[in-house]
Image: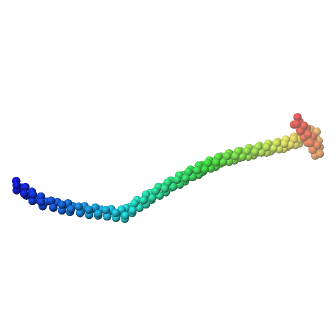
């Protein structure tokens, strides 16, 4: 056992200085790593981070501008839609007014045509009545003339004498007067 203690003592004598050397050697890489990290962080903070921050800020500004543009486009589209709806309503009103006017014009034209036709029919009826009255008067006149001639012929045969043209005309006129008086009563 003593052997083991001596061996442990020897190791202990050599181990203590090595342990301090190891401890001193372990701090150097840590400090070096810390310095390198701080230098890298400082370089990144000074050179890279502003560019990243600027890029993010530019992107944020771009997104804001796009949102504002989209809002303006939406407002313009809303205004255009409202204008379209107003013009559509105006066109509908105008079309309805045109339809109403066309119906009124057609009704007025129909009324005018009917009034014209009625006036034409009344005129034709009056003309026909005048023509009938004229034909009737001519027929009556012709009938009177024929009756007078017939009466003269019969009277001439009865009297067995010949009547002159003057006598015949006088008898015709007297007969016409008598027939006219008889037809009036």
**Toward the viewer: 160 or 90?**
90
Tell me: residue 162, above or below residue 8: above
Position of 117 with respect to 181 (left or right) is left
Q: Name the residue at 26% across, 62% down.
A: 31
Q: Is residue 57 left or right of residue 24?
A: right
What's the coloring here?
Answer: rainbow
* Quadrant position of residue 147: top right
Please identify the residue farthest to the top as the structure is shown: 185
Q: Residue at x 43, y 60 (%)?
A: 58
84 in relation to 163, above or below: below
Q: Nearer the viewer, residue 103 or 5?
A: 5
* Residue 46 percent location from the top left of the image: 37, 64
The one of 50 and 153 positioned closer to us in this rendering: 50
Q: Quadrant of the C terminus?
A: top right
| Image-quadrant location for residue 42 | bottom left
Please give the name of the residue rendered at 92% of the width and 42% of the height, measured from the top-left corner: 173
Q: Position of residue 80 (x, y in %)?
A: 55, 53
Relative to the observer, which residue lies in front, 17 or 113?
A: 17
Q: Residue 157 in the image: x percent, y percent? A: 91, 40
Observer able to see residue 164: no
Left or right of 164 on screen, residue 9:
left
């Amino acid at each position: 056992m003593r052997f083991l203690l001596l061996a442990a003592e020897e190791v202990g004598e050599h181990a203590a200085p090595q342990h301090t050397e190891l401890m001193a050697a372990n701090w150097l890489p840590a400090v070096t790593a810390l310095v390198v990290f701080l230098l890298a962080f400082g370089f990144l903070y000074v050179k890279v981070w502003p560019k990243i921050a600027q890029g993010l800020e530019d992107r944020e500004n771009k997104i804001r501008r796009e949102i504002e543009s989209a809002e303006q486009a939406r407002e313009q589209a809303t205004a255009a839609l409202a204008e379209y709806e107003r013009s559509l309503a105006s066109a509908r009103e105008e079309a309805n007014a045109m339809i109403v006017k066309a119906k009124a014009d057609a009704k007025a034209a129909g009324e005018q045509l009917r009034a014209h036709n009625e006036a034409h029919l009344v005129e034709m009826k009056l003309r026909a009545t005048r023509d009938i009255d004229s034909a009737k008067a001519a027929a009556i006149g012709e009938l009177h003339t024929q009756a007078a001639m017939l009466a003269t012929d019969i009277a001439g045969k009865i009297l067995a004498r010949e009547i002159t043209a003057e006598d015949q005309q006088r008898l015709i006129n007297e007969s016409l007067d008598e027939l006219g008086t008889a037809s009036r009563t």
